[in-house]
Amino acid sequence: MEKAAEGSPSSPARHQRRGTPRRTFVAGSLGAGATVLGVGGPGTPAAAAERRRVAVFGGGVAGLTAAQELVERGFEVTVWERKELGGKSRSIPVKGTGTEGRRDLPGEHGFRYVPGFYHHLPETMARIPAAGGDEESVHDHLVAQAGVLYSRSGGREDLRLESNPDDLPSLAEIQRLVVALVQQLGAVPPDETAFFARQIAIFATSGEKRRFGQWEKTPWREFLRTDEMSREFRRLFADGLTTHLVASRPDIASTRATGILTELYFYALAGRGSTGKLGRVLDAPTSESWIQPWVAYLRRRGVRFQVGWTVEELSLGSDGRISGARARGPGGERQRVEADWYVCAVPAERARKLWSPALRAADPALARMDKLRTEWMNGIQFYLDRPTPVLNGFVDYLDSPWALVSLSQAQYWDRDLRAEYGDGSVAESFSVNIAQWDAPGIVYNKPARECTPAQIAEETLAQMRAALEDTGRTVLPEKSVRSWHLDPAISYPDGGSTAANDEPLIVSEAGSWAHRPSHRTAVPNLFLASDYVRDNLSCATMEGANETAKRAVNTLLEAAGSDADACAVHDLYAPPELRLLRKADDVRYALGLPHVLDTPWPL
């Protein structure tokens, strides 16, 4: 097995055994929360009990993962969440839209997508009982996607790639595929395509030392030399692999983080290092198929939830441990939180507000978090009166100024939208992620953050139509759009005209690994779990949130002297045939030599 680079999340540590079979944790788990007192003073029964009380701050994927792993190992867990359980992964019902007994229309922060190269998250989902009390798990409600549509503007044919289409393509579809391949791939000069392939080969065979020592500090734009390349090259290989997928930008994105995602997608396409599918989505709105069953399962195991409570301050005791926290309730009331162990699973922009001068002095890694950067990627849903699948997969609008990616969700949902949601007229929930909020649009010539919600909806539809309908087809007719729903994290403070975002995403800026903390802090009873913490992917992902929670729990188990099995954690997939090449590159890097393929270009 490759030796992990110093500071990488794969560094060996006690309690982080890979592939360890999970035992069923019975002792102290069922009903463990019956004696949990997340709030209390030194004289309370809980304070005098065995040191098993854990306060988890944040009820998103990281917080719920930590709660599950801990309660299954006999710990007493209370989760404190300021908004709603599920965090950015929850569904957001559109209030007041349900009539005659139907539920409100389901909204989302953005559509949920589980790539095949995720391993930590699917393992957790497979251990969450599905709703209905049957023997199925949440993982059983993931539906495979067949491919992706790269939709282009300006009269060019869209490139449709499906690995397992439902039906054999028609002659017209085959013709469109050939035209798309010629138009899109032919638009990139051959020498630039060869250069991109060379750079991917360089990254794939780079050792861990070069990845962290050189590529981590190199922006993706510099790695791809985009200033020397054509506009088409930049669209396909620079913007398409950063802004559209992870809300970052090629001029700031770390080559190490972007390269990892790129190679993993290629490996998954080839059926390597994957859970078996290119990607999957849930078969119902996220909260119905995943978050609600998850919370119900945790409640049955004894986890307590304090929803609507915002943690405002952590207190550092004279012994160097967290002695408590102060939380503010939904009515403004204050309570003191006391536990033996604390897992901070709130996003980076909120976590760093908790770091007092004393905490920053105790662990300088917490202070370095101030240098971490966030960007926006938020969703808008369009509700249509007819099914509009487009294809079995997602659509990437490569030429859209706002870096749009969409998914027609109803085709995957085991639901009759007309019968179960809204006013009975909606048959499709078309979910769109907006990843670029600072570029002018094509209708109002304003960036998204300066548009009203109605203008954002109109502009988003216009950019989608400019790509989907530029060759004569009608995909999103005006009369079919019944309504829309913008992520409520987007607001306009004090009635202003410039938007604010309550839920931005962490981005992997070049060099930011040095500013990311580990799940283990210098404070003995404080642990970190979130996608800003050092993990395999170093991007804003549900996988990263889940992985860091498991690593945090493993470290907590060690600190608590627990003999429970560790959570299973996994290294990144590395093709066996490349391992010797990566080791050889580690030697070259240690000698100060460039990668063996990194020669002047063009040849």
Image (cartoon, helix red, strand yellow):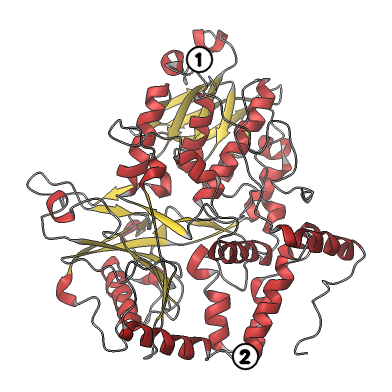
Residue 297 placement (x, y as % from top left):
38, 29
Q: Which mark is residue 28?
A: 1
Q: Secondary structure at mark 2?
A: helix
Q: Is residue 504 left or right of residue 17?
A: left
Residue at 10 percent across and 56 percent down: it is: 424
Give 244 or 532, whichever is nearer the viewer. Answer: 244
Residue 250 placement (x, y as % from top left):
60, 73
Mark with earlier residue (1, 2): 1
Query: Which residue, given by chain and number where applicable, does mark 2 sit on?
Result: 190
Residue at 30 percent across and 43 percent down: it is: 288
Q: Is residue 59 above or below residue 117?
A: above
Residue at 37 percent across and 82 percent down: it is: 445
Q: Is residue 392 left or right of residue 24?
A: left
* Mark 2 residue type: Pro
Q: Is residue 155 above or below residue 65?
A: below
Q: Is residue 402 left or right of residue 548?
A: left
